[in-house]
Image (tube, grey):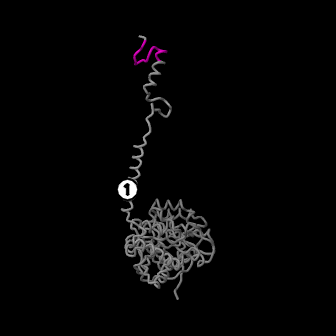
Amino acid sequence: MIQKIATRDGYGRKLAELTDEKIVVLTADLAESSRVKPFAEKHPDRFIQVGISEQDMFGMANGLALEGFIPLTNTFASFCLRGHEQIRLIAINNSNVKIVGHHAGITLGQDGVSQMCEVDISLFRTMPNFSVVVPCDALETQKSLGEIVKAKGPCYLRLSREPFPILTNDYSEFKIGKANIMREGSDVLIVACGIMVSEALLAASILQEQNINAAVMNMHTIKPLDKETLLQYANKCKAVVTCEEHSIYGGLSSAVAEALAMAKIPIKMIGINDKFGESGKPDELLEKFGLTGEHIAECCIDVLRFKDKIASGREMKDVDELMHEINTFKRELEAKAAQTNTTARPEPKAYEEDPRGRIIKMSEKDKEKVDAVLEKMFGGRKNGKKTNP
């Protein structure tokens, strides 16, 4: 039977083992939920219970980091949004603060939408100087925590509440910014992060029964993204499916799409489609939002069909060919417009008018009328010939 442990539990165990005396742990009234109690009991002099005041917690962490400490803040991922301004200051100062977002995603379950967070990766990914790490299991969480506290600069670590399968082992390599290949394949590449890696592996097994070889990439670091490995396997498979327990906007899917923008490779994104979560059992919510191995397998088949159409030339033309067609069509329109203007040119006006209605250029007939009036009134024009000297 596969062992299941929540990533927050792996975090709590490793945190209590850290020996660096510069580490200071802060929490906003969530010591039990964030699994920091063992650390607090072991190092009470380096533990701060801030209370329900996330802005103060992030501000204090910023100050501690500027004084040479390594602060780790702990609260629900959704409550990190309360401290956006203070987190931005952490980013501006490039402070060595480690923000841990617990209970992320919809697998928080019955606690409901107000406690869930579907946009936290997007928030931290768009913050300059921040790294963003989303481990796939409890063991990888422990390794990532060890690397994060050694790295300089702000970092966001995303953790979940629900127990999920252990996919890695003590010998599995972890390096910030370096993706791990969980399964080799050549037909389609599935890029996943966090708890969705286990669903991606399930999808690969389902596809194998249909003689489809799917490669599974554990993109545990969303920022900095491992573009080199991503491009290598994307070019190898020529079709990509991304899956995350997060909005498809601004998270893993966006990062992968940006990296492959010029690669001419079809991409299908699986995530939360511009919706909020809701209360329910984690398994039911994953099913409802399409975050299951079965749905990932279906999406892989869809993108493979599109890949075949591209290969046969029925769906997509080369970019240079398309631009040539557009420019040719534009020249044809310009030629038609020029011909129309030549053949149906309107008769010129006797005089031109400016926007205020003043006469700019008069016809000869109008000039004669003006001369006649001026002659009667003043004996002729100032600069013209006078009839009465």
Which residue is drawn at the image coordinates 60% and 67% (left, top)? Answer: 51
Residue 179 sits in quarter? bottom left
x and y, in percent, of residue 238 in the image = 40, 73
Query: Can residue 264 be seen by looking at this rendering?
Result: yes
User: Does residue 68 sit above or below 355 in this rendering?
Assistant: below
**As drawn, 139 above or below 278:** below
| Residue that sits furthest to the bottom in the current view | 1
- Measuring from the top left, give residue 234's x and y in whole percent: 40, 73
Q: Please, what secondary structure does the residue beneath circle 1 have?
A: helix
Which residues, given as a range, are shown in magenta? 374-387
Q: Residue at the spot x=39%, y=46% of the render?
A: 339
Name the residue furthest front. Answer: 343
Which residue in the structure is indicated by mark 1? 328
* Frontmost residue, 242 versus 81: 242
Residue placed most toward the observer, 356 or 132 = 356
Residue positioned most to the top = 389
Q: Is residue 271 above or below residue 172?
A: above
